[in-house]
Amino acid sequence: MSWGCLLLGGAFVLYPLSCSWTYLTNYSFGWWVPLLTLVLLWERWPRRPAPQPPVRSWLLPAMLVWTLLFFCLRPALEVSPVARPLDLACALLYVGALLYWVWVYGGTAWLRHFAFPLCFLLLSVPWPRQIEDPLVQGLAPINASLVAGLLPNFGILAHATGQVIVLPTCTLGVEEACSGLRSIQAALMIAFLLGELYRFGWIRRLQIVAIALVLALLGNIMRTLFLCLVANASGVHEMEEWHDAAGASILVFTSLSTFLICYLFQRQQPKSPAIQPKDSTGSILPNFAGAQRFALVFLVVVLVAEGVTQGWFAWRESSLPLLSTWKANLPTHDQAKEVKIADQTQDILKYDSGKQVNWVDQQGWKWTAFWFLYHQKPWAVSAFTNHNPDKCLPAVGYLKISDHPVINTEVGGIPLAIYPKEYSWQGSPVYVFWLVYANRSNFPLEHAVNPPNDGAVAKLRFLLSSIWNGRRGSTSETESLETILLGPADYATARAAYLTELEKIIIPEDKITPASGQPEKEKV
């Protein structure tokens, strides 16, 4: 009964963390971590020590503190379910509850024995941005530079510009998922897992971690080199067909190589007599009653907090009208070409509908438009916070010049906010107009587009305000239209041309014919 309550409650507690596993491609391995945690617990169970439950478990104070913390955390997670500090707090609360239950049931001896398998869950938590972003920004250019230096050995002249590898036949960008970060995270999980299963000491385990990290980075370089060879020989489309298989090969390479290293380490160790399972029976019985009370109260608290949170946000949203929605009617004339969005880009952005169109207007100006539609998603806010022009364009060689004032306009009766930006590409000015729209007025649009950098106090104030006003992104349908314009000599000319083009692109839903999906023609 106790484990059933802990597992069921854990499914609700870890649900926001599972949103990160789904949305953040680098952390998709997180779905495996709970299962591997159960495997490690099962592996340690036969060697469990005799229970020595504490004389006093402090059950009531512990439960009151845990309840207070979770009731504060759960509404915050509803506002921002993939916020990394909140995800970490969520995981720590659940692991803390499990460790406390183990301590109540079997005492300090059980706590020491089962601490590692339970803390293994923390490997699934996304790393803080303060650690991950510099690591990605450092790994991706290094990966690109090393591969560009290796390609001449295969008869291919190439050079690297930031995260971009310029080949004779095409240009490839080393995206976040290909930087090597995912390989490092998977290597850490594999190293800790094998170190536990082989029952190595801590020094040996750290050695295995270091070796696994080196193998992961080496495998990622080999993968990037292979994809460059395929792209140069057969084109980008053929490279995309091999992309996922090449990524899986790194995991296989790292896993098998680390397993082999562990096997060799084990053979070097002097053989010791088999360790008999410790007698878990004795005169002292485990604290069944205390552990069951805690597990039951834990489940009740989790369910009540979930119900109160959903009820509060639903009540706050009940008085908010739904706003009009629209579709992007991108050009289809002879000078326009729809470009297939790469599969790995789709995997990173996680949109429901999307389109990229390139075209040239009558003045010879070059346009590129990206339109993305997101249905109701828990990670809607983070979709714009993590993937926007300021992050994506510099990664492929654009140099940012400045931001221009927000353009507030109206097309077809729909109010729109557009965020114009100016970049430079090979010495020429490039103008980017980023339109983000949500069909609920409680969607934290400004926070999604311009995350506050005013410190912890301002972020906490915004979080509390969002909870009180019922602002969350998971119940809104959101759209973004990013338009890149190359050709105008100044911003004023680019702005005027963009607003003229926008009138043709934005089509309200009520003006689209159901059969064709095209805008209705005005009756004469």
Image (cartoon, rainbow, N blue to C red):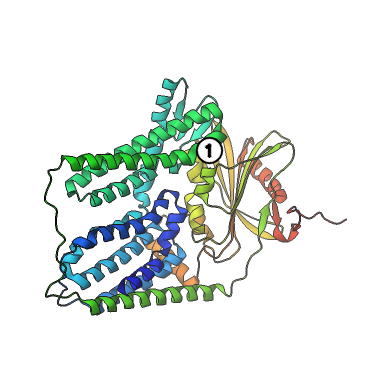
Q: In this figure, which residue is indicated by the disc labeled 1?
A: 240
| Picture layout, residue 416 above or below residue 270 | below
Q: How many marks?
A: 1
Instruction: Judge by depth and name the residue closer to the eye, 459 or 193.
Output: 193
Q: Is residue 135 left or right of residue 417?
A: left
Secondary structure under badge 1?
helix
Q: Residue at x 55, y 72 (%)?
A: 317
Q: Residue at x 25, y 66 (%)?
A: 99
Image quarter of the C terminus: bottom right
Mark 1 closeness class: few <14, some 14–19, many ≥20 residues within 10 Å: some
Instruction: Judge by depth and name the residue closer to the eye, 301 or 325.
Output: 301
The image quadrant of residue 414 is: bottom right
Q: Is residue 76 left or right of residue 516?
A: left
| Picture layout, residue 357 above or below residue 2 | above
Q: Residue at x 43, y 73 (%)?
A: 306
Can the viewer see residue 125 in this picture? no
